[in-house]
Image (cartoon, rainbow, N blue to C red):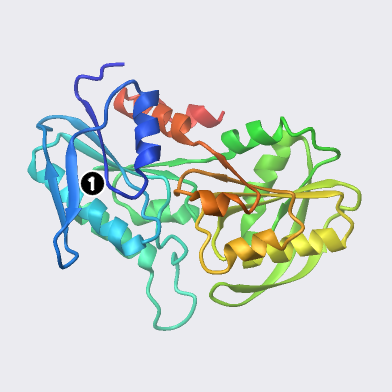
Amino acid sequence: MPTYDLKLFTGNANRPLAEEIARNLHMPLGDAEVTRFSDGEVFVRINESVRGMDVFVIQPTCPPVNDNLMELLIMLDALKRASARRITAVLPYYGYGRQDRKVESRTPISAKLVADLLEKAGVDRMLALELHAGQIQGFFNIPVDHLFANPVIVDYLGKKDLTDPVVVAPDAGGVERARAIAKRLNAGLAIIDKRREGPNHAVAMHLIGDVRDHDVVVVDDMIDTAGTLVQAVTAVAREGARRVLACGVHPVLSGPAIDRLKSSPLEEVVVTNSIPVSDAKKEARLTVLSVAPLLAEAIRRIHGEESVSNLFV
């Protein structure tokens, strides 16, 4: 791989992931200073030349979302003004992704606003992992490479020796994701019929499908307060599931999430390192899988003008 014109940079959102990606690509992270003034303003200095370079900025906009988003925007501006040839924003987690449409009158489409901000800051290309809604790709007027964590998750679940597995979608929006994993695991499929009563609050109604005496895997794209997940787990346990595991690509884990997971009948919660997970949170039966090799290979292919979609064939 021609690395002479490839540069990797990162902010403070998830430096361990960025370092692992760099190791997979056998190259160092670029030298960038990302600090704060005493009043909280973000300051960025790129301490090496990027003129004419193909630059990738690894920065999930995870909590604290606004701080990490501003770091990313200012890094993009600094790199653009330093004459980088092409700038690709690598977002293992896309903050504001759930606000992808107007759910009622006089509400914003914040996912589109963030896309506009990134483009205005100077990004030429987007590399994202498991967007909450696929249509977010259409919010950009630049190329977007959308990666899926399914290969990482399926590889792990395939080694779990599951008996008569059934993959469960916790709501109608997750059916496509659940179906894709079920197909790779040669597993059954079930769906939770859910009614949402407000932000971060949902009520599971009933189960569509058979889980009795099966090993069940509940899959979702993220685990925020864990309300939806725990309600789905409770529903399948009530219907006689033998074992219950859960998979969520993005471990947001805000508010009461950890307490809910600890008190649930879940045997294991499988997530990725798209968002940093503290050791304290790992006590909630969390298994953290690395998406660094997947992201590194995508970066290598984009830099080498090779197909990214072949990763998921």
x, y percent for residue 240: 89, 57
* 210 relative to 7, above or below: below
Tell me the kind of residue under disc 1: Val
Residue that sits furthest to the top in the current view: 1
Q: Nearer the viewer, residue 280 or 141?
A: 280
Task: Say left or right for 242 vs 178.
Answer: right
At a point 35% along the width and 33% down the height, the residue shown is 19
Q: Nearer the viewer, residue 304 or 7?
A: 7
x, y percent for residue 181: 67, 41
* 53 relative to 134, above or below: above
- Specify the quadrant that holds the N terminus: top left
Q: Secondary structure at mark 1?
A: loop
Residue annotated with mark 1: 123
Residue 226 visible to an observer of this rendering: no
Task: Say left or right for 37 vs 302.
Answer: left
- Specify the quadrant that holds the C terminus: top right
x, y percent for residue 152: 58, 34
x, y percent for residue 29: 26, 32
- What number of labels is visible? 1
